Image (cartoon, rainbow, N blue to C red):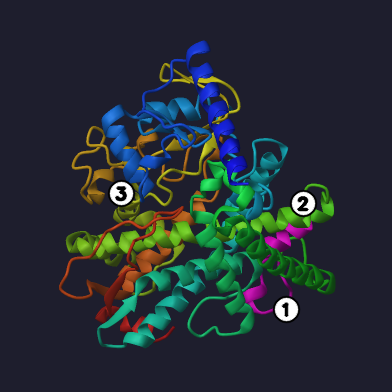
Amino acid sequence: MEVQWLDLALVFFVIFVSRFLFQKYVNPKNLPPGPAALPLIGHLYMFKQPLHRTLHQLSEKYGHILFLQFGTRKVLVISSPCAVEECFTKNDIIFANRPRTLAGKHLNYNHATIGFASYGDLWHNLRRLTTSELFSTSRLAMLSSIRLEEVQLMIKQLFQDSRNKEVKVDVSSKLMDVSFNIILRMIARKRYYGKDIIDEEATQFREIMRGYIELNGNSNLIDYLPMLKWVDFQGVEKRMIRLMEKLDKFTQILVDEHRRKKRKDTSLNLEGSYIGSSKDERKLTLIDVMLRLQEKEPELYTDVNIKAVTLAMLIAGTETSSTTMEWAMSLLIKNPEAMRKAVSEIDAKVGFGHLLNEQDLPKLEYLQNVIDETLRLYPPAPFLLPHESTHDCRVCGYDIPKETMLLVNLWTMQRDPKLWVDAEKFIPERFEGGENQGYKLIPFGAGRRACPGTVLGRRVIGLTLGTLLQSFEWNKAGTEDINMAEGTGLTMPRAHPLEALCKPRQSFIHLLSTL
């Protein structure tokens, strides 16, 4: 039996090497530069976490357009504005697809979420739904009270914990809680996060989401070495299937709850107001919107599609926002002069008579600069989501084969000293004047597959960050400087959750005490 396995491995090795040599010498292409690849595993042997730093080092050696081999996958890595522009303008349709992955199959309804869907009818329908119904200006305005209430609930809790003394705060968990509760209330009128929420349903949801974020955000060797799937390497596939069964059951319960309520509540009118209901239920949730569309076009808005959209919003609308806010708070605490400038602007343009709301955000130019500078240094997804070419094409004069995975290394591009003065420094002032940065700064992507929730994300980040700065004084916890090490995952979290000292600002105690 042992000999048979060795023979089989030898056969596969010979086939792979033969195919590699045949492609290289019989059908040569003008491929971008890159290091030498090993048979079978390609360049996987070179990678260390965090991956964006490894690829940054390769870009410094071989240039801003690289061609690599991740096992059986061809990979194009770009980190220059001109290459990005060429991929997302001239070649935008060619690179509009997504690579098929284990996470896409088992954790995203077989690639049915908007982030993982292939370019085609399904994606077009999801894009239309998100842009015209879920993230439209009118819909976001209708749900603005939810965002304000959740931020003020967080502020109230912080004030109760601190009163007039300085206390240490787990900033990371606070920001994650408020991000999840905002999206959950917008989707389903639910609150599952916070130390005061201890019911079984909330506990189950939090447990499921912890597992989901871990599995969905980690790279899987099976995606690059399909032969590992035969033995379910590290049991990843089984874990994904078990977890998705729990999550699917949970999201189906949410959909069924809203369907029953919709049938029962005949007072739901076309504008989406519940007559005579509580304040929290005066607006349609996003599940309600999708169920209404399901009645008109049931073949397009199936329960699976509704659950897929719900799941995509939960992941894309929470992790990216909370991670960006945590990096922003870290940078401001580390740079107290920038924090003082942001607070002074809020005091001058919002005043002391009310806590900040979304209508105040357009006036706060320096706060927006802080957010842009945070997104430059610590983009929520350092590679964006991967794209994949559907046809052969040319990028910056190089031949790119079909079925090549495209990775845009934002981390490298947005810290390039040739593009940015003092590229490694936190300088919000660089964005004064509101100049369009073009393809130098694309934290939410570009082209037809750019993130549809950008406006919502910026509102949540601006409202939360601005209210925290307006209401409290913030200082580092301890004598050591803040550790800015990057962790691993889809959204590049901090390696160490942020803890900081928090104390109510004297000028706002009267307002905070009324919450």
Q: Position of residue 104 (x, y in %)?
A: 61, 48
Identity of the residue drawn at 39% across and 41% down: 45
- Label 3 element class: helix
Identity of the residue drawn at 25% across and 87% down: 165
Q: Amino acid at mark 2?
A: Tyr
Q: Which mark is residue 377?
A: 3
Res 270 quadrant in image: bottom right
Numbered-mark total: 3
Q: Quadrant of the C terminus?
A: bottom left
The CA distance from mark 1 to mark 2 is 29 Å
Circle nearer the N terminus (3, 2): 2
487 relative to 232 in the view: left or right: left
Residue that badge 2 annotates:
301
488 relative to 134 in the view: left or right: left
- Label 1 element class: loop
Q: Position of residue 61 (x, y in %)?
A: 27, 30
248 relative to 263 in the view: left or right: left
| Magenta highlight on residue 270 | no
Q: Is residue 360 visible from the viewing direction of this image?
A: no
Circle nearer the N terminus (1, 2): 1
Query: Up-down: is 203 above or below 330?
Result: below
Callout 1 environment at 10 Å: few (<14), some (14 to 19), or many (20+)? few
The CA distance from mark 1 to mark 3 is 48 Å
Foreground residue among 22 and 278: 22
Q: Is residue 473 visible from the viewing direction of this image?
A: yes
Residue range in magenta is 273-292
Q: Which mark is residue 276?
A: 1
Q: Position of residue 369 (x, y in %)?
A: 31, 51
Q: Amino acid at mark 1?
A: Gly
Identity of the residue drawn at 43% across and 20% down: 31
